[in-house]
Image: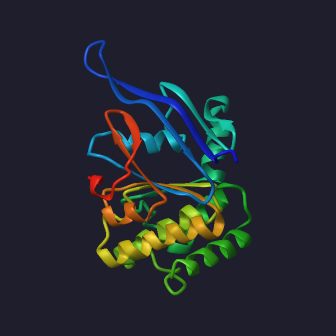
Amino acid sequence: MMPLLEVRGLRKRFPSGEAGWLDVLMQVDLAVARGEVVAIVGASGSGKSTLLHLLGALDRVTSGTIALDSVTYESLDPAALAELRNRQLGFVFQFHHLLREFSALENVMMPLCIGGLGEAEARSRAEQVLAEVGLAGRMAHRPAALSGGEQQRCAVARALVHDPDLVLADEPTGNLDHSNGVLVADLFFRLARELETAVVIVTHNRQLALRADRVLLLEDGRLAPIREVEALP
């Protein structure tokens, strides 16, 4: 069976100094199936966030290919990449990035409205997803009136509201206490199992990583599987 996400020979370099280059990612290969949760760990500065940005079509690779559902990113123009991000990808970050002027419901509706869905249908879908993440009674509240855990669950709802094929999460529990971190992690794993959504999580959270189907270490610009629990950083 073809993987949903397939990365081959990915390289990313940035200008560094006078006529110099910094190679952050070198020959990265990755395949992720539908319904699979993959955790990526590694030292700070190893390129984990850079990798997620490339997988999320937020930046261009230096060389190599990234394909989602057999469509390569390099074959898409900027408008098509923007549509792919809005329709097929979901993003969750360490800090929720909710728009403070809008309610939880309006924040979750926004991707659907941007995608052209009518307001009534967008509202109904957003209400459903917010209820699924335990925020049925908090939909009218603005982010400032929500706890940290509620804000992050709202961010997860926003990432899931359009039923993405792939969710990319960058330290999604890094700003939460233990109990809220567990709740957010549970959402990801339920998403993967019930909706067959692929999930790639960058994390320093050992407990979260151990729940994933696979754990990969990003080191010296390359990904390698971690086979022993004790080897987790």
Q: Residue furthest top?
A: 19
Observer-nearest of 77 and 204: 204
**Residue 21 horizontal side relative to residue 67, left or right:** left
Occupied quadrant, residue 169: bottom left
Tally of numbered tags: 0
Observer-nearest of 168 and 148: 168
What residue is shown at x 42% (from left), y 76% (from top)? 183
Residue 209: percent from left, percent from top: 38, 60
Q: Is residue 154 above or below residue 89?
A: below
Occupied quadrant, residue 157: bottom right
Occupied quadrant, residue 18: top left
Q: Is residue 123 above or below residue 208?
A: below
What residue is shown at x 59% (from left), y 40% (from top)? 6
What residue is shown at x 67% (from left), y 72% (from top)? 125
**Residue 102 in sight in this render:** no
Which colour style is shown?
rainbow
Q: Residue furthest bottom?
A: 137
